[in-house]
Image (tube, grey):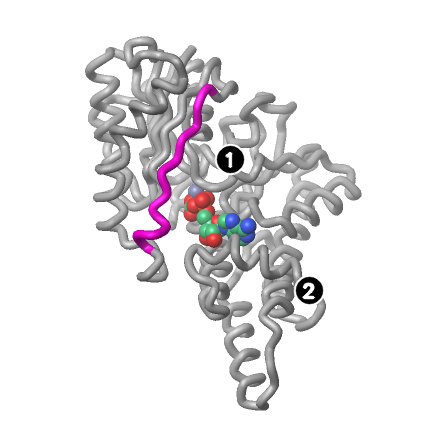
């Protein structure tokens, strides 16, 4: 079964072709970083226009590299939300056109389900149930998954998403956009114990998160040091901030896995590319007796292979999406209700 995947929910134009749900034939990406960099964030109108320009040639290249013709496709999977509505519409129009022209069934995919399913590419889903931490530019969420397609939201951020906090603190340090990867690199040269930033919500007794207090603590610290005439080592600051974020995420994920009695912890989303998060969840999760899985770095940040994978699995279950499906910027995870929806 050959399935084309299309992802345009934010600022990456992405196209992939997967065979039999889990085997990647090709997985292509056109980044828009240069376009948005000078604005310090993604400009929705520019993102949508850039998707229009990039998508058709990328689709053509993907089919060529996958060694197939558009008529060979057994399905077309596309992100329908959550995301920027104008950006989503570009990918959806292209997917609908391919489905209409070829008769291949369309399957709409939730972007967050894609991040979760990125874990299953190459090996398929392990024995459920799982607890999954989803941390991206738009979301911070802990999920319980009794089955590979069922989601229960256990907790989420009360304010900023983890990726957003990384990007904002990176901007304070003059690291450019998106700042998460740059902050991660800088932190490797710093001391994570240099500044003890608050571990927000660590002892809150629930599985929710909060990032805004930590961000304010970083701003206050920088100001106080400047006023006192002391030099701040940016690498120490980056490492200390990162440690505060990662520590709470690791502890809450393990607490959730214990509370739900699962054997496997999954991680998904762009922030899972973070080296310290990968290191700590692996060592502490395994020490606590859990199997810990996360995707390779390229499959953590936005990509179309994850969309094709999740979509293929739904197609294989006989699911179809009508061609008049609308983009939904606040689409909740299936079965999770609106509580998991904001972006
Ligand atoms: O999943 P993603 O590619 O897009 C969304 O769905 O939002 O996540 C992007 C986010 C950005 O905020 C980016 O700074 C962050 O993931 N990110 C990282 C790292 N790589 C990407 N944050 C921390 N460390 C990284 N290595
Ligand atoms: Zn994403």
Q: Classify residue 199 by image quadrant.
A: bottom right
Q: Quadrant of the N terminus?
A: top left
Q: Nearer the viewer, residue 341 or 162?
A: 162
- The residue positioned 60% from the left and 21% from the top of the image is 123
Q: Nearer the viewer, residue 8 or 288?
A: 8
Decide: marks 1, 2 in contact (CB < 8 A)?
Answer: no
Q: Which residue is mark 1?
A: 299
Which residues lie in the magenta part?
A: 25-36
- The residue positioned 59% from the left and 60% from the top of the image is 186
Answer with left or right where residue 203 lies relative to residue 271.
Answer: right
Q: State the image coordinates of residue 220 (x, y, percent, origin top left).
A: 53, 79
Q: Is residue 158 visible?
A: no
Mark found first going from the N terminus, 1 or 2: 2
Q: State the image coordinates of residue 291 (x, y, percent, origin top left).
A: 71, 34
With respect to residue 36, does 142 lie above or below?
Answer: above
Q: State the image coordinates of residue 209 (x, y, percent, origin top left).
A: 55, 57
Q: Quadrant of ligand 2?
A: top left
Q: State the image coordinates of residue 342 (x, y, percent, origin top left).
A: 38, 50
Cα–Cα gap, marks 1 and 2: 27 Å
Q: Which residue is mark 2?
A: 192
- The residue positioned 32% from the left and 34% from the top of the image is 80
With respect to residue 271, does 112 lie above or below?
Answer: above
């Amino acid at each position: 079964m050959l399935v084309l995947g299309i992802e345009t929910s934010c600022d990456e134009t992405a196209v992939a072709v997967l065979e039999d749900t889990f085997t990647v034939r090709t997985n292509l990406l056109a980044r828009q970083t240069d376009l948005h960099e000078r604005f310090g964030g993604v400009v929705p109108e520019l993102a949508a226009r850039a998707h229009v320009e990039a998508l058709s040639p990328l689709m053509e290249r993907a089919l060529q590299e996958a060694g197939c013709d558009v008529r060979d496709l057994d399905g077309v999977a596309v992100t329908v939300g959550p995301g920027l509505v104008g950006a989503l519409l570009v990918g959806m129009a292209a997917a609908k056109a391919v489905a209409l022209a070829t008769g291949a069934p369309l399957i709409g995919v939730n972007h967050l389900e894609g991040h979760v399913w990125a874990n299953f590419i190459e090996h398929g889903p392990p024995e459920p149930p799982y607890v999954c931490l989803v941390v991206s530019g738009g979301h911070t969420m802990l999920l319980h998954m009794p089955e590979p397609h069922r989601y229960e939201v256990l907790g989420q951020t009360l304010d900023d998403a983890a990726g957003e906090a990384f990007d904002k603190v990176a901007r304070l340090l003059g690291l450019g956009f998106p700042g998460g990867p740059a902050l991660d690199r800088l932190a490797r040269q710093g001391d994570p114990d240099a500044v003890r930033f608050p571990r927000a919500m660590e002892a809150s007794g629930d599985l929710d998160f909060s990032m805004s207090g930590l961000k304010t603590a970083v701003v206050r610290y920088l100001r106080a040091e400047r006023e006192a005439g002391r030099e701040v080592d940016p690498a120490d600051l980056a490492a200390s901030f990162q440690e505060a974020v990662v520590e709470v995420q690791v502890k809450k994920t393990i607490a959730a896995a214990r509370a739900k009695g699962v054997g496997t912890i999954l991680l998904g989303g762009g922030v899972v590319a973070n080296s310290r998060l990968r290191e700590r969840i692996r060592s502490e999760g395994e020490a606590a007796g859990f199997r810990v899985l996360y995707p390779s770095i390229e499959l953590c940040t936005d990509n179309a292979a994850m969309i094709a994978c999740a979509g293929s699995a739904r197609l294989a279950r006989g699911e179809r999406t009508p061609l008049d499906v609308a983009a939904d910027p606040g689409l909740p995870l299936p079965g999770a209700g609106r509580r998991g929806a904001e972006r």
